[in-house]
Image (spheres, rainbow, N blue to C red):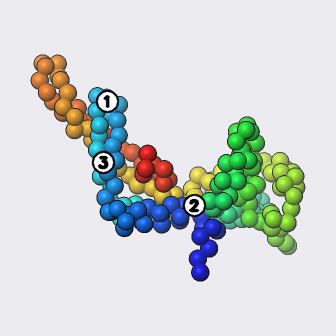
Amino acid sequence: DIDVEGMPAFDLEYIFLQLRGKAKGEVLELKYKCPKCEGEIPVAINLDDVKVIKHKDHTNKIQLTEELGVVMKYPDLELQETIGKTVENKSHIEGLFETIIHCIDYIYDTENTYPSKDHTKKEMNDFLESLTDAHFKKIAKFFDTSPALKHDVELKCPQKVKGKSKENKVCGYTEKLTLEGLGSFFA
């Protein structure tokens, strides 16, 4: 009795990645282009090592003032699709407002809670327009610290290149890379 449609996207991404591991093997072979020599850098990732990472300071309850706060909800796949369609032809600020409006579960004060589903888009927009920059920074922290499918890899180029003395040597380019979100595991 799991509501897959209501699951946060990061949980679905994790489940999908684990299913892929069980179906095709736990090791995912990726290739990156070396920015130094332009050769291929192979990377093997054990999908059992990939986790959903939650920032230690993350919370979905955001206290805006002593009397006022919001509780955010994580975008599920349907919500991500809705947000994507809604913000497609809008400015960055308009898109940000749309995203926040869709992710507010409810607003609360010292006496009541106000579910966002019970309010019009205009009312929610008016609420957001009444917030200060400090309030928006608190809301932004929700998005910045939200759980995400992440895995760190180290790229190390093994390609042979010609050196100054015309001898072949290993390129040796290295870089730490954080893969985040399902798309980065299948790029």
Q: Reply above or below: 36 against 62.
A: above
Label 1 packing within 10 angstroms: few (<14), some (14-19), many (20+): few
**Tag 2: residue type?**
Ala
Q: Is residue 77 left or right of residue 27?
A: right
* Residue ID at (17%, 18%): 164
**Tag 3: residue type?**
Val
CB under 8 Å between discs 3 and 2? no
* Residue ID at (38%, 52%): 152
Q: Which residue is mark 1?
A: 38
Q: Which residue is mark 2?
A: 9
Q: Is residue 175 left or right of residue 139?
A: left
**Front residue of 63 and 148:** 148
In the image, residue 91 lies at what x, y percent?
Answer: 73, 37
Q: CA distance from mark 1 to mark 2?
A: 34 Å
Label 3 packing within 10 angstroms: few (<14), some (14-19), many (20+): some
In the image, residue 186 lies at what x, y percent?
Answer: 43, 50
Q: CA distance from mark 1 to mark 3?
A: 15 Å
Q: Secondary structure at mark 3?
A: strand
Q: Secondary structure at mark 1?
A: loop
Q: Is residue 137 left or right of residue 111?
A: left
In the image, residue 90 lies at what x, y percent?
Answer: 74, 39
**Tag 1: residue type?**
Glu
Q: CA distance from mark 3 to mark 2?
A: 25 Å
The quadrant of the picture occupied by the C terminus is top left
Q: Reply above or below: 166 against 71.
A: above
Q: Secondary structure at mark 2?
A: helix
Q: Upstream in the sequence, badge 1 or badge 2?
A: 2
Q: Upstream in the sequence, badge 1 or badge 3?
A: 1
Residue 167 visible in the displayed image: yes
The quadrant of the picture occupied by the N terminus is bottom right
Q: Which residue is mark 3?
A: 43
